[in-house]
Amino acid sequence: MQNSGLTLNLGSGRDRRDECINADILERAKPDWLVDISKPLAATTIDWCGEPLEIGPGTFSKIIAIDVLEHIPDLVAAMTNCRDLLEMGGEMHISVPYDLSLGAWQDPTHVRAFNENSWVYYCAWAWYLGWTGSRFNMEHLEFRFSAGTDLELPQEQLLRTPRAVESMYVILKKVPI
């Protein structure tokens, strides 16, 4: 593992982070890297802290994608690009709306919501996507509950209760196949 130490804040929007390379599809977000992560990526050079930085395969140790993936129509292409941008052993930290939450579909720009099975094809079934060389392994899955949820109920019951779970926080790690 190279351990570049660089973190990509994907879909930075208003959540600009000084310690990260902020990437967004919207020019009005004033990102460090203006990019559509679901389109083919060519090696590119950006100005990072007054120095040129070449972005290509294996550039990042970590990718943060908070409330981003639900907006991307071609998620397979985006996840393939994210996998490629990570160095081996790098992690992708993701927060997405849970498919039964109120917030999953209130935003008209959402094209999908997620559940605990949404990660299978990027992990164990990566072969189905034609991925070779590397895939993701799910390192962490955390359910974030809606305000007012009765946390005294068993988790199995909460997970089956519409609107109890607001979002999921997932950590995927790039591993060799």
Image (cartoon, grey):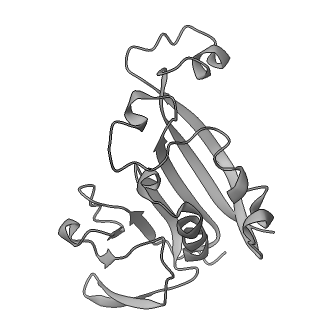
**Measuring 40% from the left and 64% from the top, which residue is drawn there?**
10
**Measuring 44% from the left and 50% from the top, which residue is drawn there?**
111
Q: In this view, does 109 lie to the left or right of 174?
A: left
Q: Which of 57 and 128 is in front in this view?
A: 128
Q: Quadrant of residue 71?
A: bottom left
Q: In which quarter of the image is residue 85?
A: bottom right
**Measuring 77% from the left and 76% from the top, which residue is drawn there?**
133
The percent coordinates of residue 121 (x first, y second) are 71, 56
The quarter in which the N terminus is drawn is bottom right
Vertical arrangement, residue 128 with respect to residue 68, above or below: below
Q: Is residue 67 left or right of residue 85?
A: left
The quarter in which the C terminus is drawn is bottom right
Q: In this view, does 151 lie to the left or right of 68?
A: right
**Measuring 27% from the left and 71% from the top, which residue is drawn there?**
31
Vertical arrangement, residue 43 with respect to residue 18, above or below: below
The percent coordinates of residue 162 (x first, y second) are 52, 20
Give the mark count: 0
Q: Nearer the viewer, residue 162 or 90?
A: 162
Q: Which of 102 and 23 is in front in this view?
A: 102
The percent coordinates of residue 128 (x first, y second) are 78, 63
Vertical arrangement, residue 44 with respect to residue 162, above or below: below
The percent coordinates of residue 97 (x first, y second) are 46, 39
